[in-house]
Image (spheres, coloured by chain):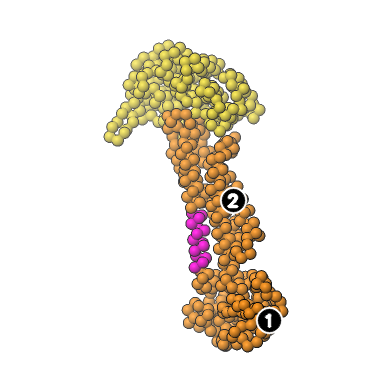
Chain colours: A orange, B yellow
Amino acid sequence: MNIAWKELKKNKSRFYILGSIVLLISLLTFIISGLANGLSQDNASLIKHLPNGEFYMTKDANQTYNLSKINHTTQEKLLNTEKDALALSIQMGFLNDVDGKQRSVSFVTATDSKFFPDVSAGEIILDSSMKEKGIQVGDKLTNNQYSGEFIVKGFVEQSKYSHAPVAFINIKDYEEIYKLAEMQLIYMPEKVISQDETNDLQSFSNKEFLNTISSYKAEQLTLNMIIWFLVVISGMLFAIFFYMMNVQKIGLFGILKAIGVKTSSLFYMMWTQMSFITVVALVISISISHLLNVFAPKGMPYYLSMETTVILSIMFLFIGFIGATLSGIQIKKVEPLQAIQRGEG
Amino acid sequence: MSILKLANIKKTFINGEVKEQILKGINLSLREGEVTALRGASGSGKSTLLTIAAGLQPATSGQILFEEQNIANMSSEQVRKIRASKFGFIFQFSHLIPFLTVEEQLMLMLEVSKSKLTKQQRKTEVNRLLNLVEMEHRRNTYPPSLSGGEKQRIAIARAIVHKPKVLFADEPTASLDSKKSKDIMKIIREITKTLNITTLLVTHDEDMLLFADQVIEMSDGQILQEER
């Protein structure tokens, strides 16, 4: 007989309350996690979409890519070592649209590669979010430091950097705007270069490179801290609620022990109830938080991946299990006699 | 023939620096199928003796021989197994499980005692017991909807559904009025006699002693007198 299930069915309101709290906390965690992911996409989708490889910038740039200037000899040497390697530069800037309105963008230029679109001089390819601002293919855009006009050649999906849409331009145009002949970064998708070949350069994995973007690091650190606090709080809530429920049920546990029910069966009863409540609460909160992936307002950077969902769900189940088990230590301690002497339970 | 034998049972409670000896070397033998009543004033040690005999708390010293085995030397798991399969309990309050129906209370006991009956046989046995305590019409009722007397009848049925060898009853009628008390005692006596269950009963109600085969009077942790 599954007494855990019988109790759940009979004392619905008590378990509804606990389930609602788990639901709310997990929903909040999923949503904040979705926002964290969304913001990270908004901040660095240009880099996040690249395969895991190595970024190189000059050592004297002190981990600030804008200050990095890789000389042509080094650049040529590295680009020749791997077919898909590329040199790139990123600079924040402005574009004036056809109505003369200034639009903030991240100008990106790169050597020929399969990872970034090919752009000829005088052309520009923009992140698709610029379409919402009324910019269309064929529009002519200007920049105060650029002598000519950029013709919008097309749009690419999910290309943002530092919360601004990316604008891919040709190297010659980039040099004209920023008066810089050297590229800032080299990206090698596969090959790891030996230390001898990169004496003046410092290497970064994709993740390490993202952390050199100061806004990215601060933003993600804050949001991740909130997420883990919520996970810890939910574990504590589990422990407190199960503790309170167990205190109310000490008489019941004592009687069950007196008639010969094993202590392990009582733990099993508690774990079954905890798992059921958590799984139901998680299914609902996952459904709602994933619906937000589709229905979140356009301007809201929200992206909740299945991988994050699964990791957080496992964490919730694990922490719920620990919380419930810690509170269940009372079950082990309870003596049948205590319960009998407490009167009618 | 003796089924449960207590030899020189002593129990001392230590409260800080104060030592209080509640049982001072009790010797007692329960004969198979008989009802033995323990009577005595409050604090005489009768309930403590019952709970020690039932393996619900350990004695400070002495032997508890059940079917020639000393329970006092057994592990808590071994004692639990004996409690589940060989003992039955009725307490002053019914202590029914609030979220199980009357029928489920009895089914749970059969499950805990690892009864070898099939599912159908268990159902038949539960029906038979509910008939015996005249509670068949309340089989699907939850405890909060039962009266005090009805709860105690169910507690009796639960205590014996798995056919225990010994039934321990600690003031089973204390929470009932005198008419209901007599009804309950009558049921306990009839059923235990029919099923040949040995009963150890604690009571302070003189009227209940009429249902016992043996009455043991206790005072200050010792047996004063045994009557048949």
Tell me if I can see residue A42 in this picture: yes
- Magenta residue check for A56: no
Which label is found at residue A282?
A: 2
In percent of width and height, residue B183 lies at 52, 15
Residue flagged by tag 1: what amino acid is it?
Lys
Residue numbers of the magenta segment: A218-232
Q: Nearer the viewer, residue B196 or A216?
A: A216
- Residue shown at the point (46%, 39%) measured from the top left: A247
Tell me if I can see residue B31 in this picture: no
| Cα separation between marks 2 and 1 | 50 Å
State which chain disc 1 sits on. A
Q: Going by the image, does B22 lie left or right of A134?
A: left
Q: Nearer the viewer, residue B11 or B136?
A: B136
> For numbered disc 2, what is the local secondary structure?
helix
Is A119 drawn above or below residue B2 in the view shown? Answer: below
> For numbered disc 1, what is the local secondary structure?
strand
- Magenta residue check for A231: yes
In percent of width and height, residue A237 lies at 49, 48
Residue flagged by tag 2: what amino acid is it?
Leu
Task: Say which residue label 1 marks.
Answer: A140
Is A90 drawn above or below residue A158 in the view shown? Answer: below
